[in-house]
Image (tube, rainbow, N blue to C red):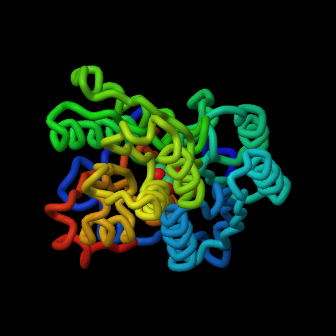
Amino acid sequence: MKRALWLSLFAFVVIGCNSGDTAKAPEGGGAAPAKPEAGKKLVVGFSQIGAESDWRTANTESIRSEAEKRGVDLKFADAQQKAENQIKAIKSFIAQGVDVIAFAPVVETGWEPVLREAKDAGIPVIVSDRRPDVPEDLYVTFIGADFVKEGEMAAEWLAKKMDGKAKIAELTGTTGSAPANDRAKGFRNVLANHPEMEIVFTQTGDFTRAKGKEVMEALLKSPQGKDIKAVYAHNDDMALGAIQAMEEAGIKPGKDIIIVSIDGVKAAFEAMVAGKLNCTVECNPLLGPYLFDAIEKVAKGEEVPKRVVIEDKWYDESTAAAELPNRKY
Ligand code: GZL
């Protein structure tokens, strides 16, 4: 079965989270589960980044529950946000002779050697969530959001909210990761059209609440802290940590300082309803159905598109209360 699995189509599919779209996202996000060959369980190795954020927790839950639902034998490895642990896990999946390998690369670089080993072993690789910087023939499909677009949506919302004028502090995601690189890029694409919207501070909070709080505490204690009128956080967890730091410093988050972030986790909606966060751009973590749809197709030698984009939308303080009951993560 492995030999016939290398299909790389340069098709491009967009899947809406809540609306009609070019690629019908069937109920639950995947086609009716295909039965593995009679008596033979599909064996899939998944290398997960870690458990750094509410988004990642929801992503892991979606992957584990979908594997369970489809009767897949899932070998799951948590890398604690270390690339070397992901490389070790992928090598172990190759040694075990799994049918398909899937992974979410914590950073963009350093994957070519191990993905070449998987290819030489005839094991197809599926990329979930974050893009690796490798030749496209080393993976069959990449399923994930458009992070540049997320950064652009965040900046467009903020520019409108601030009437085109603000000194901004940016809390960036994990250094070298595709979401951090692309969300920074997208945000700056829009700021290029708003000369009085200026990023005066940027530092990584590594996508965690604790580091987001730490970075904001230090900033508020520095002379520069008093100039900050807006915060752009690459994910909700860092924004929620920053909110805690602001409150401990006697600052009203969402009022004294306007905050926009990305992910759309439930805690962000609760913060918007409480008036402490102003906007979040959703980045759907419930990739399990799309991932196993692709895995089952690849395992049967069927065609899959090279890129599957999960579409996003933003929510702000004006829509948070109505949307909160609908949140699934
Ligand atoms: C985005 C994902 C990011 C989230 C963070 O698809 O890779 O990693 O924005 C998570 O919350 O840690």
List x then y, in percent, for residue 92. 82, 55
Quadrant location of the C terminus? Answer: bottom left
List x then y, in percent, for residue 169. 41, 39
List x then y, in percent, for residue 151. 35, 38
List x then y, in percent, for residue 25. 30, 59
Q: Nearer the viewer, residue 117 or 181?
A: 181
Q: Nearer the viewer, residue 329 or 271?
A: 271
Give left or right: position of 285 versus 316: right
Q: Report which quarter residue 99 is drawn in.
A: bottom right
Instruction: Name, please, the residue furthest toward the right.
Output: 95
Q: Report which quarter residue 147 is drawn in.
A: top left
Residue 99 seen in the figure: yes
Give left or right: position of 47 versus 257: right
Residue at (56, 47) in percent of width and height: 218
Residue at (27, 34) in percent of width and height: 166
Q: Nearer the viewer, residue 297 or 128?
A: 128
Quadrant location of the N terminus? Answer: bottom right
Q: Nearer the viewer, residue 51 or 203?
A: 203
Residue 298 seen in the figure: no
Residue at (62, 64) in percent of width and height: 51
Q: Report which quarter residue 10 is drawn in.
A: top left
Give left or right: position of 122 versus 27: right
Residue at (39, 70) in percent of width and height: 267
